[in-house]
Image: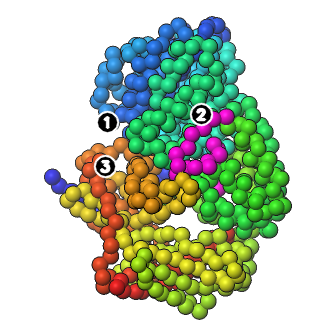
Amino acid sequence: MRRRRWSVLGAVACVLAASGCGAGFWSAESATEGATEGEGWTVLVYSIADTDLEPFLLGDLAELAEVESGEDLQIAALVDRAADYSDEEFLDVGDWVGAKYLSLGEGSAEELDDLGDVDTGDPAELAEFLERGIADHPAERYALVISDHGASWPGVGGDEGSGMSTLTLEELREGIADGLDAAGVEKLDLLGFDACLMATYETASTLAPVADRMIASQELEPGHGWDYGAFEVAADDPDVDVDTLGTAIIDGFAAQADEEGTGADITLSMIDLDRVPAIDAAVEEFSEVLSERAADVAPVVGRERAQVLSFGRDPDPSVDTHMADLGLLAAEIGEDAPGVAGEAEAVISALADAVTYQVTGPAAGGASGLSIYFPPTEDLLDTDYASVESAQAWGDFLGSYFDAGAAIPEESRPTFVDGDVAVSFDDYGLALEAAFDAAAEENVIWASIGYGEIGEDGSVTFYGEEQADVSEDGSGLVVGSYDLTTMTISDGIDTSYAYLTVTWGDDDAGVATIDVPLAYFEPGEEEYRDVTLTISFDPETGEVLNETYYSYTAAGTYGELTADPEGLIVPKLLVVSPDGIASWEPASDVGLYADLPDLEYDFVALPSGTALYAELLVEDFGGNTDSVAVEVTVP
């Protein structure tokens, strides 16, 4: 069995494909002037399974098919399958490529229509599915679940059979609104996203007009997704209200995550969309006062942004989603910047009213239920964010924040004094101490210790980064420590170093998280997909609580990685050239077979005598940095 060798990693273009016009695959006979009045619930599932998540989504649909549907609970699904990811036969329908319109329940599936090649990233297709699904399955209450990769404010999807076509937030609103209007229905009772990262302020604000409740996750979702058996409560009681059904869905997701061993960092929240206008008003006022006072509050905002709970993290900032918890961010800013405390409290209060139920794993403890986009520096800002209508005020604040960072005077930017570093070794490992000019103290938001080795060409290959401590006594002292271990990943044949960052959670939660940047190559392919291995563990015992490989698709969306065991996983390391240019490079020229369950990782102590490069770095809210480094020998 041959293995390809890689000298460089190619770049993946992450561009959202623009959706086209409706394909018009639905029969004209499905048109209706209004939905026939029915009883109970109809659940409509828009399953964008023309992606690598197909095996997971088929499992979800099989769960849903086991629900005791009938007159009081009807279930319909549009299921768009790919050619390459699964040949599994689905219940009575078998295997297929393209989209089918199905009726599910009582352990079976009935094919209502073979739709052929469908662009699930086209809002017209979503609209027509809603129109036909409601006409064919009239009920008193309607739920729509959209399942696939998610990306927070950029939307959902990545239909691989249609050029990685996605549904933006505006297209989601358009498609749902047009479908409901054609069906004669005012609103959905429940809109659910069984997808990563969709519990955002931007999503809730954009989609508030089309549904009463929304269920979504702030964090990346494990591949098993929801437990669709939770819809049984609607079969048992056709009069069940949306809040009871939503609570059952969230509780079912949490229980299934515990069974699957993925419960450490899950999130799922139910949002009362009728209360989102109050969040809109609060976020707008909060944004405006932050913009007006940006020059004064930017240091506080920057420090809190650097520390706040965030979602979809990756050590490579070009892969990180830059989504921050809205409630926690507002709370911390309000506490440290009294001049905006009232506006911050209004955001917190509005969120608390709107988030009616939620579950969080210990690694996401304290999550408020909705996140918001906040890249730490302007060079990381996605300019498409300006097109999100619901985020105009927040976008204006981001501009003011970045302007304030650019205006930091040279003399107030971080500079280490004389480059002096105190080096010591103890039972824990290596400790570095250095001081930066106190004139920059107010603006500094972050400090870290990085470690690696120097190459023959003078470049530095880093193996990891951890947060360092900054003294609060005005001395500018920075203290960082490193335990002198490196992470390795092995497929049983070859072993590779891996880069990691560590996020220490709340002390009460007892959970920390390691994020590891990787590249995944499909067999025979030379372009790779960015992957993040996320490992949650107990920092006291070292016990691993869960580990999941999440991929970043060419459509800019996220989901659990489905890997071909014959593909290759290549850890990425941060390399800084002698002229200071940073890039992510392969850890070795030999990849590891992507049989994910069999990949093993370890933390190996550096041998005595190892030549080690270590540096302390400080950064201000404008993205200005300074570092001081030493070369030491491991005792």
Of the residues under marks 2 and 1, which one precedes in the sequence? 1
Q: Look at the image and give the residue range highlighted in magenta.
A: 356-374
Residue 596's disc is 3
Q: Pointer 2: what residue? A: 215
Of the residues under marks 2 and 3, which one precedes in the sequence? 2
Q: Marks 2/1: CA distance?
A: 30 Å
SS at circle 2 = strand
Q: Residue 573 at x, y = what percent?
A: 40, 67
Residue 231's disc is none
Name the one closer to the observer, 161 or 441: 441
Write the residue at 43% across / 44% down: 262
Write the residue at 32% across / 69% down: 604
- Specify few, some or many for label 3: CA neighbours under 10 Å numbering under 14, 14-19, or 20 or more: some
Q: Residue 206 at x, y = what percent?
A: 68, 37
Name the one closer to the observer, 336 or 425: 425
Q: Pointer 1: what residue? A: 84
Q: Quadrant of the C terminus?
A: bottom left
Q: Marks 1/3: CA distance?
A: 19 Å
